[in-house]
Amino acid sequence: MKTNLLTTVDNIELKYGYVNSDPEKPWVVLVIPFGLELALAKPFFEFFQSHYNICTWENRSVLENSDRSCQVSEFSIDRHVSDMIAVMDALYIHDAILVGYCSGAGIALAAINLQPNRFTQLVLAHGEYTMLAEKKYVTQFASDMDVLLCLAASNDDRAKLVFDKIQGERFDVDLNRPAGLDQPFSDIRFLRRYAKNYLAYKSVDFEQLAAEVVHPTLLMAGGKDMQVNIESSQKIHGHIKNSTMFVDPDADHYGVLTRDSNTMIAIWNHVFENAYERNYGRQYS
């Protein structure tokens, strides 16, 4: 993976990663969850780069090495989509397959609504859709994190309380998780910005965005996913007319970050089948 930097129109520095080995290969744009470093996407790049050019980016501001405070408005979903388009423009990507993972699924839904002509198909892998008003669509993990992040976003003193509580608790219980997922909780500056970002994200109506999607779409969920549940993805699936649902009863939340996982195999199969149908299917119908 090559890396580079760009500066957004509102003067935020973005770090992005890409592989573009062949101009004839189609592009995949991967939207990783908030607060993840590019290195965690390496297994995804390695799995797909034989047949695809790939790019992703670290979302704005959260892991910035500064004491700068941020307002919730800096993390609006429109700004995240604008960041994505800026990365695509920097790499001269005219259209791409869009893969959104966890909170990246919400950004992907917004992007395909705002820029439908830039994308050919959509994959929503283990999406976080913050449907907090209905308990059946929310895991206990997501409910607990909602309380903590809303508290951390309210003021600096409460952010310190949350930071102290989280230290040593969140990831130690699950040694099978990829290393590096706890970055937003490793520094109180990151936590403050991550919490503000969460407030902006949870304010979005992802069901409404899903209802406007017309692209071929795969939604993925796992029976062993403790962060998001199957029911929430099924709810979004019900809003997208041209969509299919893939449930792996043995999948946890981390297949997109895990080398040669069943999650990546399922994405590969779906993307290939839809690309074939798009390119060749009509002449045989």
Image (cartoon, rainbow, N blue to C red):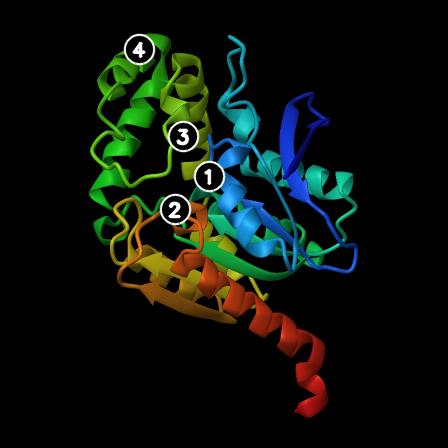
What residue would you read off at disc 2?
A: 128
Q: CA distance from mark 1 to mark 2?
A: 9 Å
Instruction: Report if residue 282 is visible in the image.
Output: yes
Q: CA distance from mark 1 to mark 4?
A: 23 Å
Disc 3 residue type?
Answer: Gly
- In the rendered image, the quadrant that contains the C terminus is bottom right
**Where's residue 276, x and y in %?**
64, 75
Looking at marks 1 and 4 on the same chain, the residue that comes earlier in the sequence is marked by: 1
In the rendered structure, are the residues bearing label 1 and label 4 in contact, judged by CB atoms less than 8 Å apart? no
- Quarter where residue 257 is shown: top left
Classify 149 as above or below 41.
above
**Count of number-bearing discs:** 4
Circle 1 sits on which residue?
33
Badge 2 vs badge 3, beta-carbon distance below 8 Å: no
Q: Earlier in the sequence, mark 2 or mark 4?
A: 2
Q: Type of residue at label 4?
A: Lys
- Name the N-terminal-most of marks 2 and 3: 2
Q: Nearer the viewer, residue 89 or 156?
A: 89
What x and y, as percent, mark residue 206? 45, 50
Mark 3, residue position: 180
Name the element at disc 2.
loop
Q: Are marks 1 and 2 in contact (CB under 8 Å)?
A: yes
Q: Amino acid at mark 1?
A: Pro
Image position of 255 (left or right of 141): right
Residue 109 in view = no
Indicate which label's residue lies in the foreground, 1 or 4.
1
